[in-house]
Image: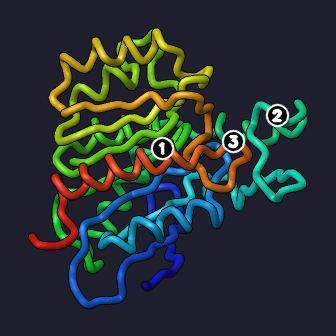
Amino acid sequence: MEERVIDVRTDSGSMPTFVTHPSEKRAFPTVVLYMDVWGVREELFDIARRIATVGYYCMVPDLYYRQGKVRHEFRNEKNQMITLDRLDQQKKAAVLAPLKKLSDAMVIDDTGALLRFVDAGEPVRPRALGSVGYCMGGRHVFRVGAAFPERFRASACLHGTDLVNGTDNSPHRDIAKAEGELYCGFAEKDRHTPPELVAGLDRASSQWKVRYRREVHAGADHGYALPDRDIYDKRAANRDWELIFAMYQRQMPAYGA
């Protein structure tokens, strides 16, 4: 495996981006991993490495770069990251503060810069890309899928937040512009995606061009898919990867095509 951190030029400056892919000399399909509210860290880089081991070129952009180097990790006695709802108010506010300065429009602009970067000579196959996003990154998967429907063909949203709001530009309306496939993994006990919201997405999906599939994981809570988290659910996360990798293989096969 090969990996490095590169600086991608954007309209707002220079965005540090972790990149990893197999060592063999050939072109790979691209996957962009969109971070959660905690920001980039080794946990996300390990997930990118897992994606790369099966034949993909995976990127993890630091979307907080406009605010400098933002890093938050609070761990328990087992060295697990403590989920946001279990932090005191001061720590919770510190984690949420950078989110308030990051708009969906910024993420779309930054994704355009990533596309220009990979198109300029990286060892990638042209056109079709995949994505995976956690928490706020799940919403960003919706946004970039809608903004670049000709590019993002295999999109995965895991315990996404703010997928539905009261505006005409709600992410669940915007995703109607997307094409290819969209997979969403939800947690049964996630306050961000109660059953009525999941049912609303099911109804809305009848108007989408994108092929939609979702799973609601029994007993899981928000953050279940992240392996360093205190509420990590291995069974649910592995089921997600089973479905995500099958989707990637349909839309942008790593081998045999």
Q: Is residue 185 left or right of residue 187?
A: left
Please state, as top left, top right, bottom left or bottom right, where the C terminus lies in the image.
Answer: bottom left
Disc 3 packing (10 Å; few <14; some 14–19; many ≥20): some
Is residue 108 depicted above or below 128 in this figure?
A: above
Image vertical order of residue 42 relative to residue 95, above or below: below
Q: Residue at x 17, y 53 (%)?
A: 251
- Residue on which disc 2 sits: 86
Q: Nearer the viewer, residue 38 or 220?
A: 220
How far apart are the alpha carbons under marks 1 and 2? Answer: 29 Å
Q: Secondary structure at mark 2?
A: helix
Tag 2 or tag 3, which sits nearer the N-term?
2
Tell me what residue is drawn at x 68 percent, y 48 percent. 38
For mark 3, what is the residue? Answer: 231
- Please name the residue shown 18% across and 38% down the image: 179
Q: On the rendered structure, is 72 left or right of 144? A: right
Total marks placed: 3
Report the mark closest to the observer, 3 or 2: 3
Identify which amino acid the numbered label 1 is placed on: Met
Q: Going by the image, does 141 lie left or right of 208?
A: right
Residue 23 at what x, y percent from top left? 35, 88
Give the percent coordinates (x, y) of residue 53: 39, 74
For the residue marked with disc 2, what is the amino acid? Arg
Mark toward the start of the polypeptide (1 vs 3): 1
Q: Which residue is mark 1?
A: 106
Q: Position of residue 12 (x, y in %)?
A: 51, 55
Q: Residue 118, located in which quarter of the rendered image?
A: bottom left
If the image is split into quadrants, where does the N terminus sit?
A: bottom left
